[in-house]
Amino acid sequence: MFRTLKPFEYLEPKSLEEATGALSKCGTEAKVYAAGVDLVPRMRKRIIAPKCIVNLQRIDEMDDVIASNKDGARIGALASLRSIELSALIKERYFVLHEAIASIASIQVKTQGTAVGNLCVATPASDVAPALFVLDAKIKAVGPSGERLIPIDEFYLGVGKTVLGPNEIITEILLPKAPANTGGGFAKLVRTVSDIAKVNAAAELTMEKGVCKEVRIAVGSVAPTVLRMKKAEDVLRGNKIDQNLIEKAASAAADAVKPITDIRSTAEYRKDTTKVLVKRVLEKALERTKA
Ligand SMILES: Cc1cc2nc3c(=O)[nH]c(=O)nc-3n(C[C@H](O)[C@H](O)[C@H](O)COP(=O)(O)OP(=O)(O)OC[C@H]3O[C@@H](n4cnc5c(N)ncnc54)[C@H](O)[C@@H]3O)c2cc1C
């Protein structure tokens, strides 16, 4: 049920220094606001009742720019999901992220919500996170003692929990340059088109003369956090890929997941469909290495 918001202090800092200073002062009672798509409904449902809201939109150093750089590309923390989905750069060089965001049905949510906000909610059903896992993304966070780079597969601690300190702000997502002959794929299973994932999966594959040079696979909604499927990757890396090997890797992924039964699905169904989705994303990724 939605109710009126509990009173809170509202701040619009103009610099990161001011913002991290305000967050340090308020401690765990404060919340950062990017677009509010997740934050505001939680406040209205009284799931959270922060005493202080720090809006990021007017901070000089924060932006929504999606651009290539010498190492690959960067996505400013204020970039909306929709602008990332529509970016020609992301579509051409990081197709798996485009495909993951395109799977989110609500244009309204994507037009307003940011990818960084999506990551920080830390739901294992995020569609953005598995794509960033397989792209080997890094998250740049700024706090009172400076900035740090967090590899995406070290970002999550559990449902709703990340390694971010209460006074840290993410400023950008960094994507490394992909080698030649790399392709990626994303897939998800949903109850209805607008629902969040029962299970989702992403893969990124680099091939050299028919041999798998590098591979990353990630699966969501099958554990408290999105998981890298390292045993499944080991099945493929260094080997010639054929249908038999893809089946073996998909089985290894299904063996590695620890899903629960909840309102969206049963644990058994999630385990079985992990195999199906991993097979599907590997086939798509392999096909796209030839493009
Ligand atoms: C109807 C609906 C359908 C949805 N469907 C999907 C779906 O199919 N797949 C999917 O993956 N997601 C889905 N979502 C989730 C959606 O993508 C996120 O809620 C949204 O992207 C949050 O972004 P935001 O910018 O509004 O974040 P906010 O609501 O402003 O913030 C969310 C959290 O992130 C923190 N935060 C935000 N930015 C920063 C920052 N720069 N530094 C540090 N902390 C920060 C905030 O403090 C807060 O804890 C859906 C949401 C809704 C409401």
Image: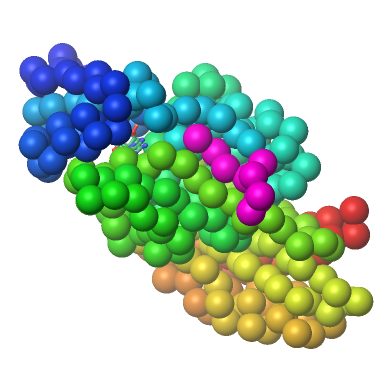
277 sits left or right of 78 in the view:
right
The number of discs equals: 0
On whether residue 185 falls in the magenta region, the answer is no
Quadrant housing residue 212? bottom right
103 sits left or right of 18 in the view:
right
Coordinates of residue 112 in the picture (x, y in percent): 47, 22
271 sits left or right of 18 in the view:
right
Check the image and report above or below for 142 versus 81: below
* Residue visible at 83% across and 56% down in the picture: 288
Does residue 238 appear in the picture of this structure?
A: yes
Which quarter shows the N terminus?
top left
* Residue visible at 50% across and 45% down in the picture: 173
Q: Nearer the viewer, residue 181 or 243?
A: 181
Coordinates of residue 128 in the picture (x, y in percent): 53, 45
Coordinates of residue 223 in the picture (x, y in percent): 40, 64
Which quarter is ligand 1 in? top left
88 sits left or right of 262 in the view:
right
* Residue visible at 42% across and 71% down in the picture: 258
Q: Nearer the viewer, residue 257 or 126?
A: 126
Check the image and report above or below for 20 versus 4: below
Magenta highlight range: 68-76
Q: Residue furthest top?
A: 4
Check the image and report above or below for 211 versus 100: below
* Residue visible at 25% across and 19% down in the picture: 12
On whether residue 75 falls in the magenta region, the answer is yes
Coordinates of residue 102 in the picture (x, y in percent): 65, 35
Does residue 36 appear in the picture of this structure?
A: no
